[in-house]
Amino acid sequence: MLTSTAFSQNIYRALEGNFEYQSMTSSAGVRFSPTKETALDPALRALARSLPRSSPGVVMMAEVPGPVGVPDLLALPGSGARLARRLNSRIPPILREIDIEIVAALNPRQGLTVETIKSRVGRSDRAVSQGLRNLSETGAVLTRGGLFYRAESLEPVGNIYALEAKVDDWRKGVRQAFRYRAWCNASALVLSRMPKNREPLISAAHRLNIGLACEDQWIVRPKICKLDRANRLRGSEHFVAALSFSPVRYPQP
């Protein structure tokens, strides 16, 4: 476990360039085996470094299990102070659905009563009360004058991009990239080669609002999708869960 000072120093290093963290989470505790798509690893990293707002640096992680699916690479460009503030808060990642819903309903400056929270979340009295107790114990929720507030550090850390690599079967890749839009701000499919008839693929990318690249060249650039606050927070917290417990980074050129 890192000391508080070392932890802070390492976090702020991530704001000074391109770094890749080793994901500390995996599906059912099983590490992923290399596949033929690993040949596209350099292309994925190059594309991540070309994303909007990437000039200050990009934080990347491979094969991070999210609420839906496991993207080959997650990229957070221009993470800035929000990522550092979230990690330095030392509030444990919030992954339970009810907890995400409660935190998303709260505001750091305008307090809410329990009854208002229950009406916004739409869960049972017992579930909301238990969730508030758990979140209060971790510092994620603050109580003042009988009202509940969200900790200021609990906000989405930035725009998260999911990149999916595919050598063959672009249709499967399109489906996977589209699924990541449920919790990532943008997603893209990266192919090693384009099909002979590329029109159906390009049309699907535009229709589903996903990016498309061949090797390290963008054909359709990914666009930021509108997510509600709960889904933005859900993706952000899964990113933090994989990142915040790892002291290992791999600098990218």
Image (cartoon, rainbow, N blue to C red):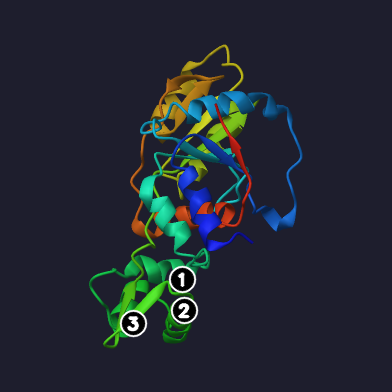
Q: Which secondary structure lies at badge 1?
A: helix
- Depth check: give the residue in front, 239 or 193: 239
In the shown orientation, is residue 242 left or right of residue 53? right
- Relative height, residue 146 to residue 225 (above, below): below
* Pointer 1 with pointer 2, Cβ within 8 A: yes
Residue lying furthest left: 110
Expressed as whole percent of the image width and height from the top left, the position of residue 171 reads: 57, 30
Expressed as whole percent of the image width and height from the top left, the position of residue 173 reads: 58, 33
Q: Mark 3 or mark 2, which has the lower sequence index?
A: 2
Q: Distance between the residues labelled 1 and 2?
A: 6 Å
Please tell me which residue is depicted at 36% across the width and 65% down the height of the picture. 104
Please tell me which residue is depicted at 37% across the width and 31% down the height of the picture. 52
What label does residue 143 carry, if any?
A: 3
What label does residue 99 carry, if any?
A: 1
- Does residue 167 appear in this view? no
Q: Mark 1 or mark 3, which has the lower sequence index?
A: 1
Q: Which secondary structure lies at badge 3?
A: strand
| The C terminus: image quadrant | top right
- Depth check: give the residue in front, 34 or 178: 34
Residue lying furthest top: 196
- Depth check: give the residue in front, 90 or 228: 90
Q: Mark 1 or mark 2, which has the lower sequence index?
A: 1
Tell me the kind of residue under disc 1: Asp
In the shown orientation, is residue 146 left or right of residue 163? left
Q: How far apart are marks 3 and 2 (CA)?
A: 13 Å
Q: Callout 1 environment at 10 Å: few (<14), some (14 to 19), or many (20+)?
A: many
Please tell me which residue is depicted at 48% across the width and 21% down the height of the picture. 200
Q: Distance between the residues labelled 1 and 3?
A: 16 Å
In the shown orientation, is residue 43 left or right of residue 26? left
What label does residue 131 carry, if any?
A: 2
